[in-house]
């Protein structure tokens, strides 16, 4: 698996197991150690690379420990402090990281509950850990723009200078994005006032504020939806989505019988945003072997087909997202027989990356 696929696989594990993880030790074993090993690429069983329960005396504080220290060339490079997965992270949890940051060579500190990873450095003052992270990785809501930055911390391509040089920009962009996101759910008065005073000429009274709170909230959400749809249309190569019914003639690919719940659907074909997002994931996987324009889609009444070269005889996968109970991804063997695999989230498509690439290669042969 490549780096993004490894992240997606760990994210799936966190999603499936987080409700059953109740202690800090369980969080370390189930989530944090796999992150250090499968994502960052360090050997958690080699004390020359990863030191658990790392101890360094700090002033009058004796015997305090940080959960993990990642070593490179005999020196501490990354400190990791862990908390229970069921607890949201707070800056108070980072007290030991603050102390250890000043007495080691580490320039990167990580506070995590196994689901969210907060990365810190010393932008505000040398050798003093900042109070705000420069990068926040949420495994249950991965920001794809951060994946290349996290990869810089891996054993194979560790690039501290590049990380530090981009940390300030990442820090403020991340904070701005999180602030904007918060306004979409619970808009503050300043946010409402900002837009209201630009479209309404009267006084900004309490009554006006109450009226425009719902209007601004609705407008911002509609704007976001418009932007998402515009990007999807651009990615799909046109202003109108192709909803052509798949050819079911003798030339078409044979498939297993359609489930009764699919037959009961309305006769109209509706291409959903979720289907398009799934298509983009499959397309991204397939593009490791073919050009992006070769991967196309056709929406039918009972499934969403993803094809190579827009050819029904070259199916890559089918998305069966029409059922309210269970979603499936249909994958094909060398004889073009389809097998449906249940998935609970779009991230799980990445778990079938090898099969998708294998199908693409068969069609090329």
Image (tube, helix red, strand yellow):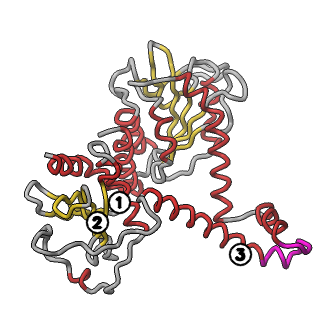
Considering every residue shown, the one lying at the far top of the view is 74
Q: Nearer the viewer, residue 133 or 166?
A: 166
Q: Secondary structure at mark 1?
A: helix
- Give the CA separation, mark 1 to mark 2: 8 Å
Q: Residues within 10 Å of mark 3 (few under 14, many from 20)?
A: few
In the rendered image, residue 212, in percent from the top left (x then y), is placed at 77, 74
Q: Nearer the viewer, residue 243 or 222?
A: 243
Work out whether 218 lies above or below 55: below
- Give the CA separation, mark 3 to mark 1: 34 Å
Q: N-terminal of the two: label 1 or label 2?
A: 1
Q: Residues at badges 3 and 1 in contact (C-beta under 8 Å)?
A: no
> Which image quarter: residue 304?
bottom left
Q: Secondary structure at mark 3?
A: helix
- Residue 224 is covered by the magenta coloring: no
User: Which residue is at a point 63% across and 57% down the rendered structure image?
Assistant: 181
90 to the left or right of 313: right
**Residue at label 1?**
279
Q: Residues within 10 Å of mark 1 (few under 14, many from 20)?
A: many
Q: Residues within 10 Å of mark 2 (few under 14, many from 20)?
A: many
**Residue at label 3?**
214
> Which image quarter: residue 119?
top right
Q: Residues at badges 1 and 2 in contact (C-beta under 8 Å)?
A: yes
In the rendered image, residue 131, in percent from the top left (x then y), is placed at 68, 36
Does residue 112 appear anywhere in the picture?
yes
Q: Nearer the viewer, residue 294 or 102?
A: 294
Considering every residue shown, the one lying at the far left of the view is 335
Q: Secondary structure at mark 2?
A: strand
Magenta region, residue range: 200-211
User: Which residue is at a point 15% across and 63% down the rendered structure image?
Assistant: 338
Q: N-terminal of the two: label 2 or label 3?
A: 3
**Residue at label 2?**
319
């Amino acid at each position: 698996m490549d780096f993004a696929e490894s992240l997606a696989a760990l994210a799936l594990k966190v999603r499936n197991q987080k409700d059953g993880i109740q202690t800090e030790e369980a969080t370390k074993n189930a989530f944090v150690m796999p992150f250090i090993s499968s994502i960052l690429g360090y050997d958690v069983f080699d004390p020359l690379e990863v030191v658990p329960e790392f101890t360094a005396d700090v002033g009058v504080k004796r015997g305090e420990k940080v959960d993990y220290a990642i070593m490179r060339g005999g020196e501490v490079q990354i400190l990791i402090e862990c908390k229970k997965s069921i607890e949201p992270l707070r800056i108070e949890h980072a007290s030991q990281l603050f102390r250890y940051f000043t007495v080691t060579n580490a320039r990167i500190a990580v506070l995590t509950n196994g689901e969210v990873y907060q990365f810190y450095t010393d932008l505000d003052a040398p050798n003093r850990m900042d109070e705000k992270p420069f990068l926040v990785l949420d495994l249950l809501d991965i920001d794809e723009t951060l994946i290349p930055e996290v990869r810089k911390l891996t054993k194979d391509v560790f690039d501290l200078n590049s990380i530090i040089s981009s940390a300030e920009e990442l820090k403020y962009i991340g904070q701005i994005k999180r602030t904007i996101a918060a306004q979409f759910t619970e808009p503050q008065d300043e946010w409402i006032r900002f837009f209201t005073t630009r479209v309404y000429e009267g006084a900004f009274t309490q009554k006006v504020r109450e009226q425009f709170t719902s209007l601004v909230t609705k407008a911002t959400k509609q704007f976001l939806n418009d932007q998402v749809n515009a990007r999807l249309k651009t990615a799909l190569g046109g202003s109108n989505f192709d909803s052509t019914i798949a050819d079911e003639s003798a030339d078409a690919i044979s498939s297993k019988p359609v489930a009764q719940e699919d037959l009961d659907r309305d006769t109209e074909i509706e291409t959903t945003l979720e289907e398009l997002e799934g298509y983009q994931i499959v397309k991204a996987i397939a593009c490791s072997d073919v050009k992006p324009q070769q991967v196309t889609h056709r929406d039918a009444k009972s499934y969403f087909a993803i094809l190579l070269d827009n050819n029904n005889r070259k199916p890559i996968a089918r998305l069966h997202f029409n059922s309210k109970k269970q979603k499936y991804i249909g994958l094909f063997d060398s004889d073009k027989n389809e097998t449906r695999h249940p998935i609970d989230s779009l991230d799980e498509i990445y778990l079938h990356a090898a099969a998708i690439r294998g199908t693409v290669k068969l069609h090329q042969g």
